[in-house]
Amino acid sequence: MELIQQTPDLSAYLAADEAIDHHHPLVRETAARLAEQVADSYAYAQAVYEFVRDTIPHSADSGDPRVTWRASDVLRLRTGICHAKAHALAALLRAEDIPTALCYQRLLHDDGGGHVVHGLVAVRFHGAWHRQDPRGNKPGVDARFRLDGERLAWIPDAESNEMDYPVLYAEPHPVVLRVLRAAHDRETLWKTLPTAL
C-alpha cells in the first residue's frame, strides 16, 4: 500500500500538539532515559515502540476503565486504547526528531457488531514511511517493529469491508480526538468510537 503524506512539509511530522505533547517533561524524561540505552535512532525507534507496546497495557485487554488521549497522560497512567498508545509512541519518537505520522485502519469491531477505526503510526527512515502498530500483543496478535515489511496487529479483510487508510496524518484525526476527549470511561468510548473516517 502506498502511503500518502498529508503535507509535504516533514516538519509537520515532528510538531507537538495537544495530544502529541512531546514538550511535556514526562515525555522528555522518558525519551531521554530510553535514548541513553541505545546506539542510534533506529535502535531508539525500536526501543520506544517495544516500550509502548509492552509496558502500557491496552485498556480493553487490562479492563482499565480510564480513557487517555494525551501522550503524557498515557505515560503517566500507563493505559490507553490503540489511538492513545499511538499518540504516546508518536510523542516519544518526535521527541528524538524522528518524523512520525498517525495512520488508521477500518476493522471489524471486537464484538463483530460493525466496524471501528483502529490507530497506529508510521515512522520515516531511509526516505520512506513504515507503519508500526503499538496496540499491544495478546493471543492472536503479534505486532513487531519492522522496516522490511509490515508486521501489524491486523491485516484488513476487504471482504469484511475492512481497509487501510493511506493518509499519513501529522495530527490526530479530529473525529478520533473528539470521541476520545468526550468519553468519560472506556465503556462509553467503546460505544462512540468512529466506524469510518
Image: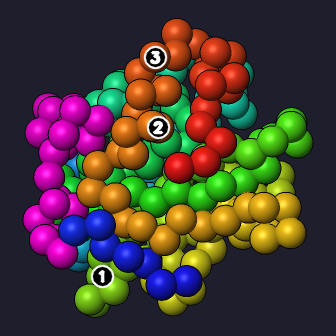
State how far apart marks 1 and 3 are (Cα).
Answer: 35 Å
State how far apart marks 2 and 3 are (Cα).
Answer: 10 Å
Closer to the eye: label 2 or 1: 2
Q: Amino acid at mark 3?
A: Ala
Q: Position of residue 79 (x, y in %)?
A: 51, 29
Closer to the eye: label 1 or 3: 3
Q: Which residue is mark 3?
A: 182
Q: Earlier in the sequence, mark 1 or mark 3?
A: 1
Mark 2 closeness class: few <14, some 14–19, many ≥20 residues within 10 Å:
many
On the rendered structure, is 141 left or right of 175? right
Q: Which quadrant of the structure image shows residue 122? A: bottom left
SS of the residue under disc 1? strand
Examine the structure image and report whether residue 170 is included in the region drawn in magenta: no
Residue shown at 58% from the left, 13% from the top: 185
- The stretch in magenta equals 8-28
Who is closer to the viewer here, 26 or 99? Answer: 99
Q: Are marks 1 and 3 in contact (CB under 8 Å)?
A: no
Q: Which quadrant of the structure image shows residue 195? A: top right
106 versus 129 height, above or below: above
Mark 3 closeness class: few <14, some 14–19, many ≥20 residues within 10 Å:
few
Q: Earlier in the sequence, mark 2 or mark 1?
A: 1
SS of the residue under disc 2? helix
Residue shown at 86% from the left, 37% from the top: 113
148 versus 151 height, above or below: below
Q: Position of residue 72 (x, y in %)?
A: 29, 31
Q: Give me the disc on residue 48.
A: none
Q: Which residue is mark 1?
A: 125
Q: Which residue is mark 2?
A: 176
Q: Amino acid at mark 2?
A: Val
Q: Report if residue 93 is visible in the image.
A: no
Residue shown at 64% from the left, 15% from the top: 188
Q: Amino acid at mark 1?
A: Phe
